Amino acid sequence: MAFETLDKITVEDISAVGIPVDEAGRLHGKLSEILRDHGHSPPEAWRVISKRLLRPDLPFPLHQMLYYGCYRGLGSDTPPAWSPDPEDAILTNVGRLLERQGKEFLGSKYKDPISSFSDFQEFSVSNPEVYWKTVLDEMGVSFSVPPSCILRIHELDGSHESYPGGQWLPGAFLNSAQNCLSLNDKRGLHDVMVIWRDEGYDDLPVHRMTLKELRAEVCLVANALETMDLAKGSAVAIDMPMTVIAVVIYLAIVLAGYVVVSIADSFAPREISTRLNISNAKAIFTQDFIARGDKSIPLYSRVVEANAPPAIVIPGKGSTIAVELRDCDVSWHSFQGRVKNSIYSDYTAVDQPIETFTNILFSSGTTGEPKAIPWTHASPLKAASDAWCHMDIRKGDVVAWPTNLGWMMGPWLVYATLLNGASMALYNGSPLGYGFAKFVQDAKVTMLGVVPSIVRAWKSTNCTTGLSWSTIRCFGSTGEASSVDEYLWLMGRANYKPVIEYCGGTEIGGGFVSGSLLQPQSLAAFSTPAMGCTLLILGPDGNPLPQNMPGIGELALDAAMFGSSTTLLNANHYDIYFRGMPVWNGKVLRRHGDEFERTIGGYYRAHGRADDTMNLGGIKVSSIEIERICNAVDNAILETAAIGVPPLGGGPEQLVIAVVFKDLIDSEEIQIG
């Protein structure tokens, strides 16, 4: 659709999108005033229009008309949809830090948090000892034994393949769950740590759990785990929705010195079995059913079919298990009862070396068996530091991000909130409808995380109508490519708060490229490498293009990334991520596999996988896996080809399957998907 420049928009144009003539005249008059005062600068004009003229209740076509009209004819590939305000910028986590120590870090180059942010990002790469010590202190991270240094660099001689980027926090001992539960200036006993609501109870007040209550619940489960006589370091799986009980279980497993095995609650028995076998899990927490509206989706039966180890089964609804259990399994009530009435009211955390495994997560299995990626005690610190810097999560914030402990954003959410003294907001139900949207309002969410497919569902049903998202300070987005129009709509629901695009991976422990509240944010684009990260785009010859220059190609990462993986349970880590990669500045680069573009405007855009992997609904899967399943749908199928097609307007890839039949006469009778 073609849009006129702002000076050519008439009252009739505004009225044509569904606004009464009187209101259209008032809006046009206000637009004329803004153009008179700010029309010389499109970014400034849009900033004022989005803050003073547009409202969530106005038709979205008006938002589009004014946004595209503001930037029409400029030829910019990344016009900003939001720009930071200097007064707000100095109140962010990074802004406060730079106001105190900016001149110490950057010397005479330091001007202010906004104009010096890129210099600070470069400082975080070139001065890891200073940067990471500062940020860990800012977050109040406590070590039972402090590290001997921040980063120990090894020579590139092949003898340190486990640490090609160096060894982080060598010698340190801590427990990351204990750090979530300990008292400091970010957390008091009566501070709310978890806010939640169950689907179907949308008109009732939200539930709240204080730090004191959370600690008591976690210690209870940790003590109950001790009754299972598992060796420390044993793997214990979680396969259930991300409820407050799931969070308590997660923290208790880590607190007690065991290792969480993350399994998504959507997985079929075969996928569950694969992950249990790879991790050698000794027990599993699960639910009898998953309650979604009037439906009860079986979960325990899938776990049983996967031949799982002894299970602790939580009721999905009410307080009574709705299935008959195996002899080796116990109900949640019975499990807690082992210690509930005993003398146990506290638990001493198991302190461990920084490199000890805390969580085994899995890739999506794009070429068969999924990669088993261990998180150590360093990974939570990476997740929380990204949240501290890029999403500005701090004490008093309320963070909602529909996800699951089976994917990295589930553990990320736990650490990003609790280590920063914020509350996590959990909705036990579908995030696609009015119930979740109302929960965002009622919980007073300040940072709302999304994936584009959720935003698309909200926009298509307009389920946010009549609700106030005025407490939101920013959105976060990850998982798949986003669409400009859908995210313009999303920003408009909260009076044009920024969307912080965030891209990383399970093996990164967080993100390698992101946005920032100290930089202008463009829709469907990243504004900066994540703190402590260096991004390089490989040219046609396989070597890095000049830094900070426009270009497109396969993305490579500097190996020195805090919190990133150093081993895989079922594959050779060095072979997967480093072998065959070019050497840059004396270090072998880390393979990532995405194709990225650095634009003329200095932003980054993701263009999908550089291999045959597709990103469908935030899950990476290969064409080979899809074709294998489709080929087995019916004997009449000769061959299939799975293709990921990006939409013309941007956004997630759409799956297209081409089918060749053995006999074309029967082709109309076969359906796939």
Image: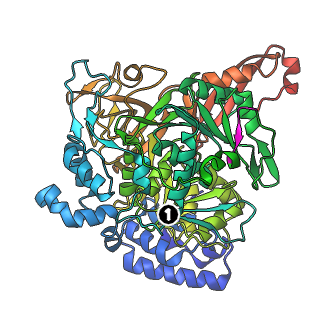
Q: Residue at x 57, y 27 (%)?
A: 365
Q: Residue at x 48, y 48 (%)?
A: 412
The x, y position of residue 194, in whole percent, is 54, 61
Q: Is residue 574 above or below residue 486?
A: above
Provide the residue span drawn in magenta: 327-332
Please state which of residues 477 and 34 is positioned toward the viewer in this rendering.
477
| Residue 370 highlighted magenta (yes or no) | no
The x, y position of residue 46, in whole percent, is 44, 69
Q: Is residue 235 left or right of residue 352?
A: right
Q: Quadrant of residue 19?
A: bottom right
The x, y position of residue 453, in whole percent, is 62, 49
Q: Is residue 431 above or below residue 190?
A: above
Q: Is residue 323 left or right of residue 576?
A: right
Q: Is residue 413 visible?
A: yes
Q: Residue at x 39, y 41 (%)?
A: 377
What count of labels does the image hold? 1
Q: Is residue 164 left or right of residue 259?
A: left
Please state which of residues 515 and 383 is positioned toward the viewer in this rendering.
383
SS under mark 1: helix
The x, y position of residue 477, in whole percent, is 51, 52
Q: Is residue 559 above or below residue 240?
A: above
Q: Where does the N terminus fall, quadrant-wise?
A: bottom right
| Residue 328 highlighted magenta (yes or no) | yes
Please state which of residues 402 and 190 is positioned toward the viewer in this rendering.
190
Q: Quadrant of residue 457?
A: bottom right
Q: Is residue 636 left or right of residue 275?
A: right
Q: Quadrant of residue 120?
A: bottom left
Q: Is residue 651 visible?
A: no
Q: Which residue is mark 1?
A: 212
Q: Where does the C terminus fall, quadrant-wise?
A: top right
